[in-house]
Image (tube, rainbow, N blue to C red):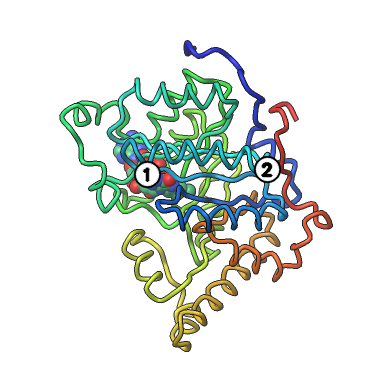
Amino acid sequence: MSTFSSQQSSEQARVEALIRKAEVSVSFDFYPPRTEKAAERLYRSIEELVPLRPSFVTVGYGTGPVTRALTHELVLRIRRMTGLTVVPHLTCLGCSKSEIEQLVGTYYEEGIRNILALRGERSGANAKARSFSEADSKHKRDFPHAVDLVRFIKREFPEISVGAGCHCEGHRETPNRLLEMEYLRAKVDAGVDWLVTQLFFDNREFYDFQARCRMAGIEVPILAGIMPIVSKKDMHRIADLSPATRFPGQLLKAVDRVSSDAMVRNVGTTWATGQVFDLIENQVDGIHLFTRNRSRAALEIYRGLGMSEAEDTGAGASGEQSSSS
Ligand SMILES: Cc1cc2nc3c(=O)[nH]c(=O)nc-3n(C[C@H](O)[C@H](O)[C@H](O)COP(=O)(O)OP(=O)(O)OC[C@H]3O[C@@H](n4cnc5c(N)ncnc54)[C@H](O)[C@@H]3O)c2cc1C
């Protein structure tokens, strides 16, 4: 057990309890803003989204000490602003055990009881930004995969609920789908309490993945990661960052029919609304909306589903309840 003393500040509810409690669990993903203007927009968006009563919200994690501090600040700020359960993302690639212990220990003392444990990217902009020092490369071996982070948190901070990422359309580093499922199963066996998928546009991919998980004995809730397209450029960026993502022909046709970004955004929101509608009909464990720090798409999706008055639907279950609730 860690040397960090138990609860100093009010404890947050565990995500799996919040998911169980909500009729339809919807959660939102935010990331730390980099400019004053972006920060203003984010806080405005949060104010507009809180009335939708999300089950919880998550805060993305960059690399390097500056962005790490931004994640921490944003987690505390959203919590103060809204009283919602806030879940920090945490990536482990290139981090030492002591760094991770310090960071998770601080969260623990602040009453944070949920972490989304991820590995981080080995290539691309994130990895470049990481710019390993000598010491960093030495620590590369501390947490080669997310499973190592999950094990560490569960051993040192057993009261923390740990979420993990999963990739219903596969992850570029493991083309062997059977092996990939074994790795995911090992991650869950290490103590993962809930999973969130990478974004996807074809629900059939999700249902198939979910069925394969259940066959493999993975019983924890699997939240569907949904991100509406906002422009043609955005679609290409998603394809670059997440090459496994399938873009269904119907979606591409609809995007192709329109010329302005405003219209592409409408298509993207309509598509995402259809996905969410279908997922709810099929009793998904929860929806995790990647908001990109904007409220508009989420508000439109809620309206499209007739869920904008959250009190009437029982959607979400927010608040700083204790983990026993
Ligand atoms: C919901 C969600 C949120 C995210 N948020 C962030 C964020 O805030 N910041 C950020 O930097 N990135 C974020 N990412 C991106 C994530 O860091 C990348 O997708 C990364 O490439 C993989 O992360 P993972 O946690 O799935 O890694 P892992 O579970 O470690 O898997 C990575 C690869 O290694 C393979 N693997 C797993 N175990 C083993 C093993 N024992 N031996 C060999 N191979 C193995 C897997 O099959 C997979 O191909 C997020 C991803 C998701 C799905």
- Residue 179 visible in image: no
Label 2: element kind: helix
Q: 236 or 171, which is in the foreground?
A: 236
- Residue 39 visible in image: yes
Whichever of labels 1 and 2 marks the residue nearer the N terminus, that label is: 2
Instruction: Say whether residue 125 is left or right of residue 286.
Output: left
Q: 152 or 101, which is in the foreground?
A: 101
Q: How many marks?
A: 2
* Residue beneath the point at 61% across and 43% down: 221
For the residue with label 1, is its CB less than 8 Å from the closest atom of ligand 1?
A: yes
Q: Position of residue 92 (x, y in %)?
A: 35, 34
Q: Which residue is mark 1?
A: 62
Q: Which residue is mark 2?
A: 19
The quarter of the rendered structure image containing the C terminus is top right
> Between marks 1 and 2, how big is the CA–CA gap?
26 Å
Label 1: element kind: loop
Q: Nearer the viewer, mark 1 or mark 2?
A: 1
